[in-house]
Amino acid sequence: MQVMVNGQQQELRPGATVASVVRSLPGAPEGRGIAVARGGEVIPRSAWQSTKLRDGDQLEVVVAVQGG
């Protein structure tokens, strides 16, 4: 299935979840400091594992960084 993640098309296996996408991102240990929205709606962290993605979904994943 095709899903847009931060504006880039990705091929994911059927049954992929928000949690599986977050785990695949570099620099995001355990999903800390991350917010995810699907179609503009924020997905609570508690729902990442149970939120299955569908063909054509658009995800925006934002990673907080420390700095000054």
Image: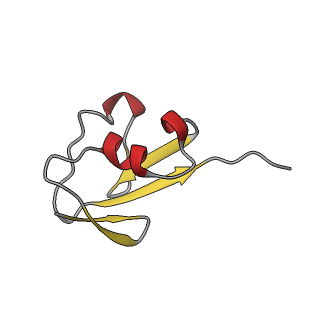
Residue at 53 percent of width and 52 percent of height: 62
50 sits left or right of 59 in the view: left
Instruction: State the count of labels.
Output: 0
Q: Is residue 66 left or right of residue 24?
A: right
Examine the image and state in which quarter residue 50 appears: top left
Residue 53 in the image: above or below residue 33: below
From this view, report whether residue 31 is shown above or below residue 10.
above
Choose between 40 and 7: the one closer to the eye: 7
x then y, percent, for residue 20? 32, 44
Quick one: quadrant of the N terminus?
A: bottom left
In the picture as drawn, the residue positioned furthest to the bottom comes out as 8
What is the x, y in percent for residue 48?
33, 36
Measured as percent of width and height from the top left, residue 58 is found at: 31, 62
Q: Is residue 40 above or below residue 28?
A: below
Q: Residue furthest left?
A: 14
| Image color mode | secondary structure
Q: Position of residue 63 (x, y in %)?
A: 57, 49
66 and 28: which one is in front?
Answer: 28
Instruction: Give the residue at x 52% y 52%.
Output: 26
In the visual, does 26 lie left or right of 12? right
The reply, left or right, for residue 55 in relation to residue 43 is left
Residue at the limit of the structure toward the right, as seen here? 68
Residue at 54% over, 44% down? 28
